[in-house]
């Protein structure tokens, strides 16, 4: 997957969501260092401006721009689209990085030193229907709405790339519910409506207190389902748009706020894989899930 020698000869524009800190911010930095013009987005304008200042201190003042964005608010996505269209006329790279865990951590849980603080607290974290809906709205629908709104601008690029930051948690074995696994694993017949059907069934069972009876994941249920959904959506998109390179990636267990800074990888290491996929040369893989640099499984879509 080495970059072609003439691949970055013209100005290219990227959007990164959830980019005011952590992996998102580092993705922006690494892309900007490659000469990409990066639109850093975040919900909070103050935090977004502070992130831009940090990148400017690295000498990247000509390559980074902030634009306010809440991926769960379609009006802000439309404003971003208008800005990109007026300023650049097209978009080359979209990195959907914004995400939430969908649980409430208990700060009072006592963990022994030999245990992993994040994973142990995750096991006893509180799940609610409201948090579950926020999680799927951010992690799945937020990415989906971004793609749908920005698709016309990506189609104007001669090298459109979409990278959906996912997680190994979204593997189908973690979904557990056999019916849901069957739907999401049926590559030939998978549609957006069927992905929505799985989510709606999960939420209905959640509201009725049937997660255990219906064999849904007992912990971090909404997060697992949201990542399984974005993995499935990536397959659907890649099949629908063969001229794009569209992939999802687990960046690894990275030291960020979302995992209580308990990861084994630095943000620099975590950002490497999303950036690599964002800069794939023509003819690269599409419709795949990567665990960092490793191609974990190949989607059976008749594409490479």
Image (spheres, rainbow, N blue to C red):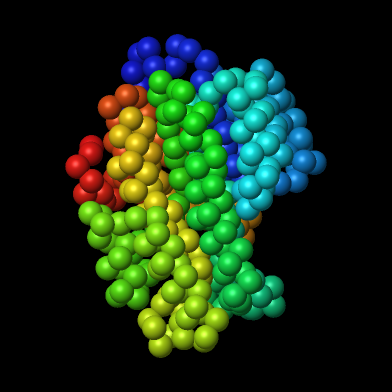
Quarter of the rendering containing residue 8: top left
**Residue 180 in view, yes or no:** yes
Q: Position of residue 276 (x, y in %)?
A: 41, 33
Q: In the image, is 172 to the left or to the right of 110?
A: left
Q: Quadrant of the N terminus?
A: top left
Q: Up-down: is 259 above or below 113?
A: above
The structure residue drawn at horizontal position 45% and vertical position 67%, both measured from the top left corner, is 199
Q: Position of residue 73 (x, y in %)?
A: 66, 50
Say which of 146 and 110 sits in front: 146
**Residue 266 in view, yes or no:** no
Q: In the image, is 33 to the left or to the right of 236?
A: right
Q: Quadrant of the C terminus?
A: top left
Q: Up-down: is 43 above or below 134?
A: above
Q: Up-down: is 121 above or below 261?
A: below
Q: In the image, is 79 to the left or to the right of 140?
A: right
The structure residue drawn at horizontal position 40% and vertical position 24%, both measured from the top left corner, is 159
Quarter of the rendering containing residue 87: top right
The structure residue drawn at horizontal position 35% and vertical position 13%, both measured from the top left corner, is 5
The structure residue drawn at horizontal position 72% and vertical position 25%, both measured from the top left corner, is 57
Q: In the image, is 189 to the left or to the right of 290?
A: left
Quarter of the rendering containing residue 21: top right
């Amino acid at each position: 997957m080495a970059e072609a020698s003439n691949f970055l000869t013209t100005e290219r524009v990227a959007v990164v969501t959830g980019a005011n800190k952590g992996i998102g911010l580092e993705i922006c930095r690494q892309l900007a260092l490659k000469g990409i013009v990066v639109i850093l987005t975040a919900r909070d304008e103050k935090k977004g401006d502070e992130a831009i200042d940090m990148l400017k201190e690295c000498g990247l003042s000509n390559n980074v721009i902030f634009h306010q964005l809440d991926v769960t608010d379609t009006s802000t996505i439309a404003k971003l689209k208008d800005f990109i269209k007026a300023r650049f006329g097209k978009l080359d790279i979209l990195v959907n990085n914004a995400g939430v865990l969908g649980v409430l951590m208990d700060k009072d849980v006592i963990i022994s030193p030999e245990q992993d603080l994040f994973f142990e607290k995750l096991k006893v974290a509180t799940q609610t229907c409201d948090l579950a809906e926020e999680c799927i709205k951010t992690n799945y629908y937020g990415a989906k709405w971004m793609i749908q709104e920005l698709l016309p601008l990506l189609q104007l690029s001669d090298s459109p790339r979409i990278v959906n930051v996912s997680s190994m948690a979204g593997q189908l074995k973690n979904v557990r519910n056999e019916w849901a696994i069957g739907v999401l694993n049926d590559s030939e017949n998978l549609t957006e409506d069927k992905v929505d059907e799985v989510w709606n069934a999960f939420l209905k069972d959640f509201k009725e207190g049937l997660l255990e009876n219906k064999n849904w994941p007992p912990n971090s249920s909404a997060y697992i389902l949201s990542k399984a959904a974005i993995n499935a959506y990536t397959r659907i998109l890649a099949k629908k748009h063969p001229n794009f390179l569209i992939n999802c990636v687990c960046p690894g267990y990275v030291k960020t706020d979302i995992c209580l800074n308990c990861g084994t990888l630095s943000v620099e290491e975590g950002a490497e894989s999303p950036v690599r996929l964002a800069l794939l040369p023509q003819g690269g893989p599409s419709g795949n899930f990567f665990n960092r640099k490793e191609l974990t499984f190949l989607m059976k879509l008749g594409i490479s």
